[in-house]
């Protein structure tokens, strides 16, 4: 599958969302077929459409002290954290050209993540009834999408640096009492974001073919 790819680097969540919506319009109007946006975010907690505010465990003062903003967004899912130690990916895909099935799309994203992690030597899996990707029952990747006119936006975050997973303690991730892990924790070493972007771009293209 061919698609446009953008790398926004380390960027404010609001600025990345603006870019998402610009690309969404391009895809919706069929000026481009599909796109994949890669970025890393400054610390932010986002709340999906069904988030229970009680899933934010930190006090307002603690969030202010840590300079972590809280934003409500259009995607599905519950509360999650984004930070510079993650790779966040926004697939803006027109499902009219693929398969008009949101569950299928989610499973393809999970498959792309699992294959990319496998290439690094990490054995990752899906758990029955749960969206996302897990390593030894700890969550390494979270997925939350929105769909309008069968065009997708929002997407998934893959935890890369272990130090950044500490901020997940400020929330109940995805509304659950779970532990988050990272590529760095699984491998015991750091990896380059550039290599990870290349792998995910390849695997997403293959899974959507």
Image: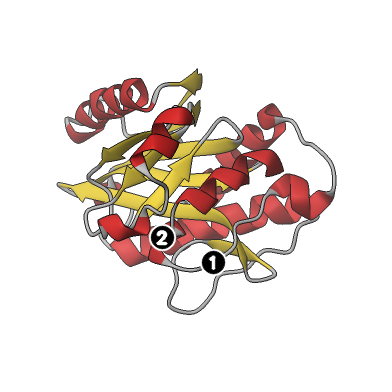
| Residue at position x 25%, y 42% in the image | 73
Judging depth in this view, the residue of 171 and 108 nearest the camera is 171
**Spot occupied by residue 120 in the image (x, y as percentages of width and height):** 77, 49
Q: Which residue is mark 1?
A: 178
Q: Which residue is mark 2?
A: 174
| Residue at position x 67%, y 27% in the image | 194
Judging depth in this view, the residue of 191 and 181 nearest the camera is 181
**Spot occupied by residue 45 in the image (x, y as percentages of width and height):** 39, 41
Residue 195 in view (yes/no): yes
In what element is the residue under mark 2? helix
Crowd rating for badge 2 (residues with CA inside 10 Å; few <14, some 14–19, many 20+)? many
**Spot occupied by residue 78 in the image (x, y as percentages of width and height):** 33, 57
Distance from the alpha carbon under mark 1 to that under mark 2: 9 Å
For residue 198, side relative to residue 91 (left or right): right
For residue 13, side relative to residue 195 (left or right): left
The answer to whether the residue labelled 1 contacts the one labelled 2, judged by CB atoms less than 8 Å apart, is: yes
Residue 1 in view (yes/no): no
């Amino acid at each position: 599958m061919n698609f446009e790819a953008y790398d926004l680097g380390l960027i404010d969540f609001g600025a990345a969302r603006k870019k998402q919506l610009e690309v969404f319009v391009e895809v919706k109007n069929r000026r481009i077929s599909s796109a994949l946006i890669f970025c890393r975010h400054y610390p932010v907690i986002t709340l999906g459409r069904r988030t229970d505010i009680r899933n934010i465990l930190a006090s307002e003062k603690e969030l202010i002290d840590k300079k972590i903003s809280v934003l409500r967004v259009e995607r599905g899912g519950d509360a999650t954290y984004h930070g510079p130690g993650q790779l966040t990916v926004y697939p803006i895909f027109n499902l009219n050209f693929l398969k008009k099935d949101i569950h299928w799309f989610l499973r393809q994203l999970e498959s792309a993540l699992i294959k990319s992690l496998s290439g690094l030597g990490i054995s990752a899996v899906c758990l029955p009834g749960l969206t996302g990707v897990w390593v030894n029952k700890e969550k390494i990747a979270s997925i939350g999408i929105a769909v309008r006119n069968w065009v997708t936006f929002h997407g998934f975050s893959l935890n890369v640096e272990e130090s950044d997973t500490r901020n997940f303690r400020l929330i109940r991730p995805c509304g659950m009492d779970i532990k988050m892990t990272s590529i760095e924790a699984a491998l015991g070493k750091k990896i380059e974001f550039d290599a990870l972007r290349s792998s995910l771009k390849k695997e997403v293209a293959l899974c959507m073919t």
